[in-house]
Amino acid sequence: MPDTARIFTDIIELVKTLDPANTRKWFDDLVVMRFAHGLLEIGCPDEVTAQFLNDNCRGAFTKAAQSATGHLVTVKFGTAHAQIAPSTAPRPEWAVKLHPDYSFENFVVGPANRLAHASCIAVSQAPGVTYNPLFLYGSVGLGKTHLLHATCHETQKKFHGASVRFLSCEQFVNAFISAIEKGNLPEFQSHCRTVDMLVIDDVQFLREREHSQEEFFHTFNALYNNRKQIVLTADCAPAELPSLEERLISRFKWGLVARLDAPSYETRVAIVQKKAHLRGLEIPEPVAEYIAHKVQANIRELEGALTIIYATAKTIGEEVSLDLAKRAIGAEVDLHKNITISEIIDAVTDYYDVRLTDLQSKKRSQSITLPRQICMFLARSLTRHSLEEIGGHLGGRDHTTVLHACSKIKELQKNDPQTNAQLAELTKTITQS
């Protein structure tokens, strides 16, 4: 067992180097359940952390285990209090996938998000009673998704056996379309209309989807009439949602509408410190203040800057310091410069080695589609151009195509460490050029 413990310690340290974006402080609490015959079974504190590791870290753990042992190793995750099953059952289509980091305890409250935070706590304590529906809105990366996860966490903790459905608007629409194609619409409706809480992220993507709006209208009515909780998020207030039926917009305003704004400097410092603590990273106060001063757009960019600094420290074997932070994210980053779409396109075409004519063409190969979608995402994040203007620079695409691209890249940014690192690197290149 001492040898196993030593090897597992080496594996954890390798994982921290291989995948700094997903490294967490609680990695040190993981235990070895079984290590024999090329199978490493790792025990996790709970099912949520096990699911997080399965979804985000299996590759890094497998590579680290094989490097540490010099042999082919299969890695499995499960809860420490139960033997891991020989085979992993497929996750149900409608299973709630919650992020272990996104809890109320890990949410930094400030003037810009205080109402949204308090309303989510109230909803989790009395679903369907206090604020129904609860509608949160704000720009990308301000904490809306974090609050949704935290609300689901707390509701399931307080009300054991509560049925919670948490999905993106795109997942709702795709599942609805699939149900129609497969002829199992009643099953889809049962999944959505018989729950205790339905949580939909980015509801603005219902725009211009008439049949999906009709389905959601009836789903909303069924839940509301049965006093079941509805929680929604969007990038703008209900009254500003374009191409959405008035009867839906009016229902979105029946409960509480809460706005999230960009965090203040003091809140940003606290966020950096909280994110560092979650990763088990000791960060000096001057470094936290430096990051908060340089990155002012949103929380996701703060996390991206922290990831770059952490990865740099691990790679070169130095302690995190102000000097290292300046070398890692650049001492002269100017996030207030007037960035143009042309500058973004130039950076993306150089990075992915593609041509502008390819991005503007109708080509749909992955090698072209991904850079094109990243261009749209960065243009929306770093400029003030409208969706139509962004689409116009990339082959005359309409605003719904741009919205879909932003949704796709946002999802990859949350779930794919490689894409998150590429976005951080491109943002650094664009803002420093």
Image (cartoon, rainbow, N blue to C red):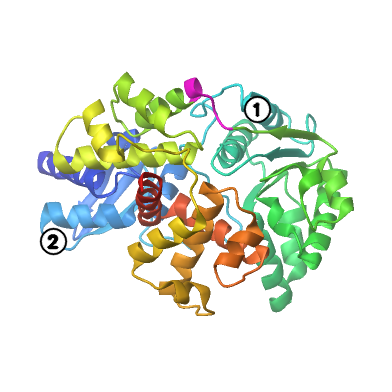
Where disc 1 sits, the SS reads helix
Q: What residue type is labelled 2?
A: His
Image position, residue 21 (x, y; %):
34, 45
Quarter containing the N terminus: top left
Vertical placement of residue 67 versus 175, above or below? above
Vertical placement of residue 335 versus 215, above or below? above
Residue 83 visible (yes or no): no
How many other residues sit within 10 Å of disc 2, few (<14), some (14-19) or many (≥20)?
few
Image position, residue 170 (x, y; %):
64, 60
Image position, residue 260 (x, y; %):
64, 33
Residue 393 visible (yes or no): yes
- The answer to whether residue 401 is magenta is no
Task: Look at mark 2 in the image and give the residue it sits on.
Answer: 71
Displayed quadrant of residue 10:
top left
Q: What stretch is highlighted in magenta?
A: 262-267
Residue at the spot 49% in from the left edge and 36% down from the top edge: 299
- The answer to whether residue 264 is magenta is yes
Looking at the image, residue 208 sits to the left or right of residue 46; the answer is right
Displayed quadrant of residue 73:
bottom left
Residue at the spot 33% in from the left edge and 36% down from the top edge: 332
Looking at the image, residue 197 sits to the left or right of residue 157; the answer is right
Viewer-proximal residue among 384 and 141: 384
Looking at the image, residue 25 sits to the left or right of residue 400; the answer is left
Residue at the spot 45% in from the left edge and 57% down from the top edge: 344
Task: Look at mark 1 in the image and give the residue it sits on.
Answer: 121
Q: What residue type is labelled 1?
A: Ile
The answer to whether marks 2 and 1 mark residues whose Cβ atoms lie closer than 8 Å is no
Displayed quadrant of residue 114:
top right
Residue at the spot 66% in from the left edge and 31% down from the top edge: 120
Vertical placement of residue 365 versus 137, above or below? below
